[in-house]
Image (tube, rainbow, N blue to C red):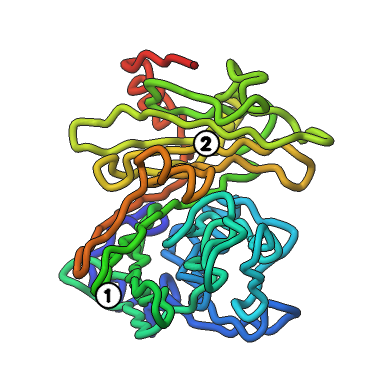
Amino acid sequence: MNIYGKNYQINELRQRVGNTDQIAAVRSVRLDDGNERPGRAALIHTGVGLQLTVLLDRCLDIAAASFQGKAMGWRSTTGDVAPQFFEPEGVRWLRSYFGGLVTTCGLINVGAPRPDSPLSGIGLHGRIGNTPARDLRIVQEWEENEYVLSVTGTMRETAVFGENLTLTRTVSTRLGEHRFWIHDVAVNEGFKDTTYMLLYHCNIGWPALDAGSEMISPSRAVRPRDAEAADGKENWARMDPPTHGYKEKCYYHDMAEAEDGSVTVAMVNDGFDRGAGFGVYLKYYKKELPRFVQWKQMGEQDYVIGFEPCNCGVEGRDVDEKQGLLNTLEPGESKVVTLEFGPITTKEQVDRLRAERARVKTTVD
């Protein structure tokens, strides 16, 4: 494997370090400052500049990610917040929305809250992202010729007389790897059909996002969510500088799949000719997540582009139900989702993405 620009065999690496955590590891820590306390996290580094913070008490979401010192995700003003401080009613989910590279939304509701919901279960974006993991398993070991780094845990969203859903997640990468993966399995462990809404709030921030940065995606159709998004819809792919008083814009995309069924979406700050280019990509599978929402928020501090592959809309459960788009899981039924994330560090990567996009004709409604 290639480490620090040179290829090594396993024994050659082992001869050079007493403990493999000298070059790559998963380390579990406690968060102990302000309202992040008493949260837990797993810190992962792969030896080539990829670093992740996985929140063990927040759905194993990715609170921070960076590559060679450059942030891949946006961090909100709340910072990390322990689940004890979660306010589920209405839109107060925003009080503990740390942003991060990945925040998970669902499983009973995604999007707008429903004020008359029983058991306070249908606030903004649901409860799963504030649910601690159980049955945690951390792996850092050689599997044949690869040193695997992974964290696995299970979140349960349940209530007496209500739903009984689990989401088992594995966040994984390898020694020498630039990429990482999220593998999720959602299961209805109850005995009645249950609503199943799932959205991955993947939040790209500066330096991949800046004035003139470009969203590169195989979008066949782009539809504004509302009148606010319709204003300036022709610029959906081009990013603005931080703008005072900016109101969020959301766009629904119909994505074209690659031959293997995957969709790759990227945010690119294209300064590679000056040595300052950087980007972040997300790869997912349309069969698993058939819908996609782009969240464009160009405000000061709230400066973020959201890639949101999902199985639902963002207007809330009631709207999906009225439109006949609401998904359910039958008793014992399961659904699998796999996501891949990585940095974009070369012009060649950007050229390949643009070539793929050029094959797709985009219509903006």
Name the element at disc 2. Answer: strand
Q: Which residue is mark 1?
A: 190
Residue sticking out furthest to the right = 244
Above/below status of 199 relative to 269: below
Residue 179 on image: x %, y %: 38, 53
Above/below status of 216 relative to 123: above
Mark toward the start of the polypeptide (1 vs 2):
1
Residue for point 55% across, 26% down: 224
Residue 109 on image: x %, y %: 47, 57
Near mark 1 (Cα within 10 A), the count class, few <14, some 14-19 or many ≥20, is some
Q: Which residue is mark 2?
A: 294
- Residue 303 sits in which quadrant? top right
Q: Is residue 346 left or right of residue 91?
A: left
- Which quadrant would the N terminus be assigned to in this image? bottom left
Residue 188 on image: x %, y %: 27, 69
Residue type at mark 1 is: Gly
- Relative to the observer, which residue lies in front, 249 or 109? 109
Q: CA distance from mark 1 to mark 2?
A: 33 Å
- Badge nearest the viewer, 1 or 2: 1
Residue type at mark 2 is: Gln
Task: Let me know if residue 53 appears in the view.
Answer: no
Task: Let me know if residue 135 appears in the view.
Answer: yes
- Residue 193 sits in which quadrant? bottom left
- Relative to the observer, which residue lies in front, 53 or 323? 323
Name the element at disc 1. Answer: loop
